[in-house]
Image (spheres, grey):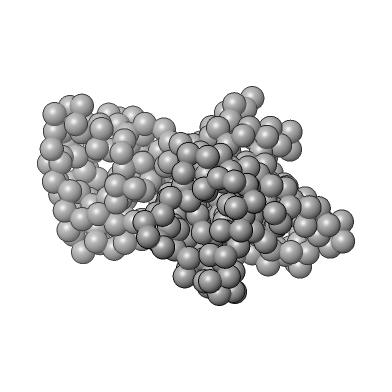
Amino acid sequence: MNLQQFRFIRETIRRNYNLTEASRILFTSQPGVSKAIIEFEDELGIKVFERHGKRIKGLTKPGQAVASIIERIMIEVDNLKKVSDEFARRDEGSLVIACTHTQARYFLPKFIPEFRRRFPKVHVSLAEGSPMQLAQMVLQEQADIALATESLSEVTGLATLPCYCWEHTLVVKPDHPLTELTSSQARNLSLEQIAEFPIITYDRAFSGRTSIDQAFAEKGIKPDIVLEAIDADVIKTYVDVEMGIGIIAGVAFDPRRDGGFVGIPVGHLFGKHTTRIGLKSGVFLRDYVYDFLSMLTPELSRDAIEAALNSNGTGDTDVDYVPPLRRVS
């Protein structure tokens, strides 16, 4: 057996058992991939893949154990390459951040320019998607870091750490009836009052939407959600054309930039949410990645990050700090 066979098997699994797609990614032929897999199975004396005719349909029970071992081996092989790069080119390389639109648009601009000043030879890329897509990018090593609120801590193979906390904000036009509330009334705004108006908010996979639905359901209220979107800019656009009131992440509202709107904090209704950092368990991180993570959350120590990486992908990692509540400033 050899590393090439390991790569072929791992990529076949990653590509949902599609040999044509796996061979394309590996820059080789489909018969070559198929032959390597069969030779590997013959050498081990077990069937790794279940087949229907010539088509691979999934993993056998022993194949599941083999796949897990191969994944660990390949992680360590990749780590060897990263160690070499770290000492040969300490301040050069790439940093791929998988993030939601909210993180890319409102949170990361406070940190990436400073990171680029510190590490001008590091190429930074942002890859946007849904939280589950972001998790898969990190697991498949298409990204170094995932940054999202939902789902990351539930993904096997992904170690996560809290980055910061946030609350929802209600966004309305300046002439909306809700702007006539006193400060005390706004702090005690109820779900019943909000439900009197059409609502524009996030798609169900994004930015704490689950907590919004749960809050209304617990009160037995069925809100009139007229539009769902994946980012706050779109929500604000439709608030501006008076389709309804918007519920967005607090980090996405800046009174200086959003002068055409009034923001009313509604954390008392929908709770506090934690945006998390996701890392692939067991990977070797370049020093500049640790520096970037410490910029995002100064409370996050290198020891805590390393403990997360060694957590065997059990998801949420216990840490000895409470992430800060952040708003756009």
Viewer-nearest residue: 242 or 127: 127
Looking at the image, can residue 297 be seen?
no
Viewer-nearest residue: 107 or 46: 46
Q: Where is residue 186 in the image (x, y as percent from the top left)?
A: 28, 35
**At 68% across and 67% down in the image, what residue appears?**
123
Q: Where is residue 129 in the image (x, y as percent from the top left)?
A: 43, 58
Viewer-nearest residue: 60 or 159: 60
Q: Which residue lies furthest to the right in this view?
A: 88
Viewer-nearest residue: 45 or 140: 45
Question: Left or right of 29: which side holds 254?
Answer: left
**At 70% across and 54% down in the image, what residue appears?**
1
Quarter of the figure with residue 184? top left
Is residue 191 positioned above or below 134 on the image? above
Quarter of the figure with residue 257? bottom left
**At 56% across and 58% down in the image, what residue appears?**
38
Question: Left or right of 126: which side holds 185?
Answer: left
Q: Where is residue 7 in the image (x, y as percent from the top left)?
A: 63, 59
Is residue 283 positioned above or below 105 on the image? above
**At 53% across and 65% down in the image, what residue appears?**
34
Q: Where is residue 240 in the image (x, y as percent from the top left)?
A: 25, 62
